[in-house]
Image (cartoon, grey):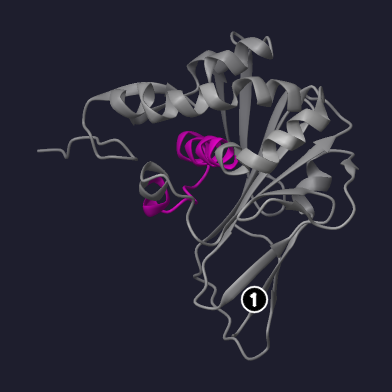
Amino acid sequence: MANKRECVFCENTNLSKEHIFAQWLLKELNIFNNDVLMTHANIAGMPISNRKHAFSKLVNGLVCETCNNGWMSQLEGDCQNHIINLMNMNELETELAFLNEHHETVAKWAFKNVILLNSATNYRHLVPDEHYKELYSGKIPEGVFIDLAFCKSNPTIEWRQTHGGMILKDRNIPFNPNAKRYHITFQIKNLLLKVTYYESLNNTFYEDEGAVRLYPRFGVYGTPKIFDSIDDFDIHGFFHEYKE
């Protein structure tokens, strides 16, 4: 007998069809019925597979009714108006003051979006199962860094997923090619959000010059800037790995 499908967050079997991007966001962007072509490319940039969906049908079938209509719905409600302002670059002084107090809430919203995006798209699953469980328990996993920035270009919505990220290492730390890691960036209008993870027994620090750090601590690394494109933001940032 086949195993029952379970919610990626709480293992409940009463599953729903959770939209990867909330319906309010798709309607705000006026793309609810638009098609999206998702391309999985290799390291050389050559397409491996393509998948075409209407945004309204881009769903994750491994989220239960309780999570969908409970904590996830609450998170969307807490962030909706602020995300709309940020993606339109409206009332930025007010919104940055909001982030100063509530940056972890917006970080959880970004984290939820990218891990569900990874699980539902035609790309290898980068996010460990335990990361879904930790978000369900109300935490962002240790080793995850979340940054926010703004972009001159406005493609409505776009994203990048990769296994990599450049690692700068102490020579005394053994190289671990099997370390769990991921690097997922998405853009909605002028708003850029990036979630980066690197698993290590040593201390790690990730820096992204010009971005606003949402998690683990709120702040700006270097001089704030507006990036030219999602690719410019995506390639920024380096891990430093070191021993105590």
Q: Quadrant of residue 11?
A: top left
> Quarter holding the C terminus?
bottom right
Residue at the (74%, 36%) spot, across then down? 97
* Magenta part, dominant SS: helix
Q: Position of residue 151 (x, y in %)?
A: 84, 35
Is residue 231 toward the left or the right of residue 178 in the image?
right
Residue at the (35%, 47%) spot, across then down? 133
Is residue 39 toward the left or the right of residue 201 in the image?
right
Q: Position of residue 226 (x, y in %)?
A: 89, 40
Q: Position of residue 41 (x, y in %)?
A: 64, 44
- Mark 1, residues whose alpha carbon is within 10 Å: few (<14), some, or many (≥20)? some
Q: Quadrant of residue 158?
A: top right
Is residue 33 toward the left or the right of residue 72 in the image?
right
Q: Is residue 241 magenta?
A: no
Residue at the (52%, 72%) spot, across then down? 200
> Quarter holding the N terminus?
top left
Q: Between residues 58 and 45, which one lies in front from this camera angle?
A: 58
Residue at the (43%, 29%) spot, across then down? 72
Q: Is residue 150 above or below residue 59?
A: below
Q: Position of residue 124 (x, y in %)?
A: 49, 47
Q: Which residue is mark 1?
A: 241
Q: Which residues are magenta?
A: 107-132
Type of amino acid under label 1: Glu
Q: Residue furthest left?
A: 1
Q: Is residue 204 above or below residue 126?
A: below
Q: Between residues 21 and 40, which one lies in front from this camera angle?
A: 21
For mark 1, give the secondary structure.
strand
Is residue 79 toward the left or the right of residue 230 in the image?
left
